Image (cartoon, rainbow, N blue to C red):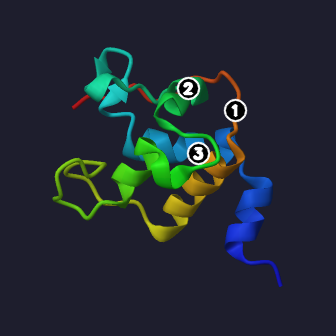
Amino acid sequence: MITIAVALLLAVDFEKQVAPLLERSCLECHRPGLIAGGLRVDTASDALKAVRPGRPQESPLYTRTQLAAGKTGAMPPGGPPLTAAQSEVLRAWMLRAHTGPRVSLSRTAKR
């Protein structure tokens, strides 16, 4: 039997899995026009600036989502934390060090 983690590692897709996650949880503060902390996540290449390829445990984009809600630096701030499944998608994408397509996320979130 293949575990979810192994299946994700083999089949993670930026456009279908990672982009919607970033759009829902990160884009409100990390997009063109509002680049909180100097980070944009509206394209894979922008998001990869906070990723250590193959090392999610050393990647700010991942580690900050793993902090308990309310802790300094926890992401997303004030929003619900990522689910275990969402965290695994993000981690699997980083393990494979995908660059993903140069696709812009559709949402133009505003606070």
Q: Amino acid at mark 1?
A: Gly
| Amino acid identity at mark 3 | Val
> Would you say the residues marked 1 and 3 are in contact, meaning their CB atoms lie under 8 Å apart?
yes
Q: Amino acid at mark 2?
A: Thr
Q: What separation in Å lies between label 1 and label 3 (alpha carbons)?
A: 9 Å
Assign the C terminus to one quadrant of the image. Answer: top left
Q: CA distance from mark 1 to mark 2?
A: 8 Å
First of labels 3, 2 by sequence position: 3
Residue at the extreme top of the image, as rendered:
33
What residue did someone put label 1 on? 100
Mark 2, residue position: 43
Q: Residue 75: percent from the left, percent from the top?
A: 30, 49
Is residue 77 positioned above or below 36 on the image? below
The secondary structure type at the circle numbered 1 is: loop
Q: Is residue 70 left or right of residue 33?
A: left
Residue at screen point 32% across, 22% down: 38
Q: Please tell me how crowded label 2 is: few (under 14), some (14-19), or many (20+) other residues with Cα within 10 Å.
A: many
Q: Name the residue that disc number 3 marks.
A: 18
Question: Nearest the camera: 72 or 90?
Answer: 72
- The residue lying at 78 percent from left, 55 percent from top is 11
Relative side of 95 to 73, left or right: right
Of helix, strand and loop, which one carries label 2?
A: loop
- At 61% from the left and 47% from the top, the residue drawn is 94
Answer yes or no: do the residues labelled 1 and 2 have beta carbons within 8 Å? yes
In the image, residue 31 above or below residue 68: above
